Image (cartoon, grey):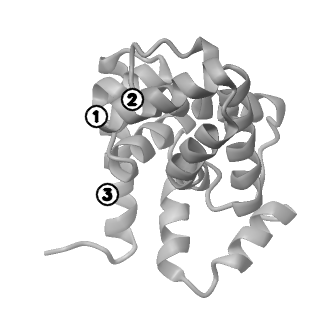
Amino acid sequence: MKELNDLSLVTRVAVLHDRRAFDTLVRKYQSPVRRFFLHQTLGDEQLSDDLAQDTFVKAYTHITAFRGLSGFSTWLFRIAYNVFYDYMRSHRQQADLDTPEVARRTAAHADTSLALDVYDALALLADRERTCITLQLIEGQPIDKISEITGMPAGTVKSHLSRGKEKLADYLKKNGYDRK
C-alpha cells in the first residue's frame, strides 16, 4: 500500500507537475534522508540539510527517470548516496582535529556524550562501511535494497557490514559499552 501511494504521488508529479504531491513525498522522506546524511557527515547538521535539499532537488528534476523497478524510497536513497559521494569527491580534504569543522562538531555534541561516541565510532569506519551500516542499522534497509542504493554487489555490502560492525563493536567495548 505504501509503495502504491508513493507511485501515485510520483505519477502526479511526473505527469501533472503537481508540486503538492512532491511536497507530500518530501515530508514523508525528509527525516530519513536527513538522518542518513547526519550519520554520513558525522553530525554536521548544516551540511546534512544542504545535502538533503540537493537530493530532493535532483529527485524533482529527474522524477521522470523513476521507472518503478524498485520502491521510491530506494530510488531516493540512491540519489542521496550519489549526492553524498559527489560531495565527498569534490571535497577530498581530510579533516584533522585542528580543523574548524571538527571543533564545531565536537562543541555541538559535547553535552551529549552518547551522540559524540556514536559519531566517533562511525568516524572509524571507511565511507562505504559507514554507508552500509547507516542504511542497515539506522534506516532498516535489507541487504538487497542497500545493494540497489549503492550499486555494490550484495556480497560486497555484506563484507562492508561485517567489517563495520566488527569495528563498531571493538570501539564500543573499548569505551565501556560492553554488556557482560
Q: Quadrant of residue 99?
A: bottom right
Dot placed on the residue nearer the N-terminal end, 3 or 1 = 1
Amino acid tagged 1: Pro
Mark 2–mark 3 Cα distance, whole angstroms, equals 21 Å
Amino acid tagged 2: Ile
Height in image: 42 above or below 174?
above
The residue singled out by tag 2 in the image is 146
- Left or right of 96 on screen, residue 137: left
- Label 2 close to label 1 by CB (< 8 Å): yes
Q: Quadrant of residue 38?
A: bottom right
**Along the line of sight, the residue nearer the viewer: 131 or 50:** 50
- Is residue 141 in sight in this rendering? yes
Q: Residue at x 73, y 79 (%)?
A: 107
The residue singled out by tag 3 in the image is 169
**Along the line of sight, the residue nearer the viewer: 101 or 32:** 32
Dot placed on the residue nearer the N-terminal end, 2 or 3 = 2
